[in-house]
Amino acid sequence: MWQVASLIKFQSKIRVILTFFKIYVIINYKGGTKMYNIAQVISLICNGHCNYCMCGNELLMSDKDKKEVDINDLIDFYRMLDSDEVMQVKITGGETFHPLVVDRTQKLVEYLLYERKGPLDSIQINSNGYFKIPDFCKHPAVKIQFSLDGDKDYQNKTCGIPVFDRVIANIKYCQKSGINCYIMSVITNGNLKNIENLIEATKYLNGVEIKSQYVAPVGFGKEMHGETMLGLRTVEEANKRWGFVRPYHTICPHTFTDNRNKTFCIKANGVITQCPILQQFETKYNIYNITKEEIESGVLKNELNSMFGMKSCCFPNGFYEYYNSLDDSEKEEFESLLEPQQKAFVHERMEKSLND
């Protein structure tokens, strides 16, 4: 078992290096630094009921009550953004391949692949892996992120549907068909053992990549835990074991960046926000009332920075408020769990926040 974990940890380090190289290439594309990085919530319709779902009670609404913009209006918005800037789009839900949703997903993907006037870096499609993988995913620019958090018993219980065998079958299909895919596991305070079981259960899948992130305290995830140091301890432990866990974001890395990297999220109803995890915070902008000039000039970025400030997917109510609630010993422990660069960034942002 330890040999498998060690191999995965080594592969993860290689992927990190390649990821940073890819970012460098994108940033220096055509000697410039501009790109669009858009998270698109295509729909809130889903057949699953994951106990940590970021959509929370919105998921429990009837399908007819889940507001969605017309897909043609959404494509018109993307058409407005046509330019020589690189675009990267992540499509999530809901369930992107649900029979009531897949046509919307397909239309957006095919517009981006075949009609967009401008360079396309990649399209990521997030899925619970229950439904058949459509042919439009066979394009090399498309990759699928499958949700898988543990072994069969754990996954089926967590998702609320018998999905494990279907995910495995779909991963095998993707590998056979040349479709890019990987696994994303959500870590909670109680499922570290199940991640080990997942590694064991998937080791025969020709080295499929496994990534993971800590459950965000939003939606149903908020009922599992609040904004606590426990999550940081769990991520620290997971990284020691495997080394493929997304950093525990004290402050959102997309906040306070300049407008060269235009990062934002479009909700299913067309409202623009920072990211899918923080959907409860909405800007005044949507796909109908914002202009290309407001996006490219930094007006939208300023709105996002002002609204989200010290918030992140791990501290949606604001890291500054949480940090100040700790006593001196807790602050010392908290900082001991941070990477040096992360610690420096936290102090820099808190100092600026106090001076503003």
Image: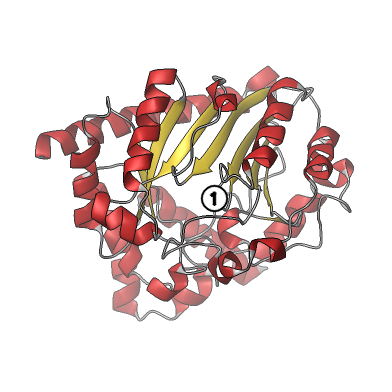
Residue 116 appears left or right of 58: right
The residue closer to the viewer here, 178 or 9, is: 178
Q: Is residue 205 above or below residue 297?
A: above
On the image, which quarter does residue 111 sit in? top right
Q: Position of residue 27 (x, y in %)?
A: 61, 28
Q: Residue at x 77, y 25 (%)?
A: 116
Residue 46 appears left or right of 16: right
Q: Is residue 7 above or below residue 189?
A: above
Q: Position of residue 342 (x, y in %)?
A: 43, 52
Q: Quadrant of the C terminus?
A: bottom right
Give the class, few, some or many, for how many residues have Cα within 10 Å of label 1's Cα (few <14, many ≥20): few
Q: Residue at x 65, y 46 (%)?
A: 40
Q: Residue at x 19, y 48 (%)?
A: 197
Specify the amino acid type for callout 1.
Pro
Say how many tags the image has: 1
Residue 108 appears left or right of 310: right
Q: Is residue 181 above or below residue 97?
A: above
Disc 1, SS: loop
Q: Residue at x 78, y 52 (%)?
A: 69
